[in-house]
Amino acid sequence: MKAKEIQKMSVEEITQKLVEAKQELARERATLVSGTKSENSGKIRKLKRDIARMFTVLNQKEVKA
């Protein structure tokens, strides 16, 4: 997800997406630890970056308000 897309969302939408991304990251990490081969090896990295982007945009919106 790109930063521009996140900036267009409301705070509630970003918070909801953030919760979903954290849950998905936990699932991906669990499959990695269990030894199961992941279909998409770069998914964890992408999720971590998306989560960081969401936190950044949330903080920017809080400072603006």
Image: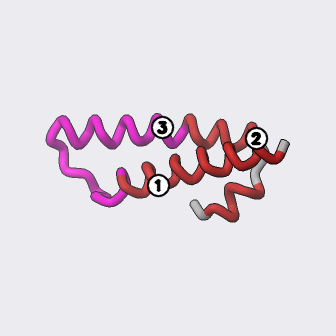
Identify the residue at horizontal 68%, vertical 44% (top origin). 58
Mark 3 residue type: Lys
Which amino acid, mark 2? Answer: Glu
Q: Report the span colored magenta.
A: 20-44
Q: At 36% across and 51% down in the image, what residue appears? A: 44
Residue 33: x %, y % from top left? 20, 37
Labels 2, 1: front one: 2
Taking the magenta stretch, the answer to whether it contains residue 39 is: yes
Magenta stretch encompasses residue 38: yes
Q: Are marks 3 and 1 in contact (CB under 8 Å)?
A: no
State if disc 1 and disc 2 touch (CB < 8 Å): no
Residue designated by label 2: 62
Give the number of the disc on residue 49: 1
Residue 22 tag number: 3
Whichever of labels 3 and 1 marks the residue nearer the N terminus, that label is: 3
The 10 Å Cα crowd at callout 3, few under 14, some 14 to 19, many 20 or more, is some
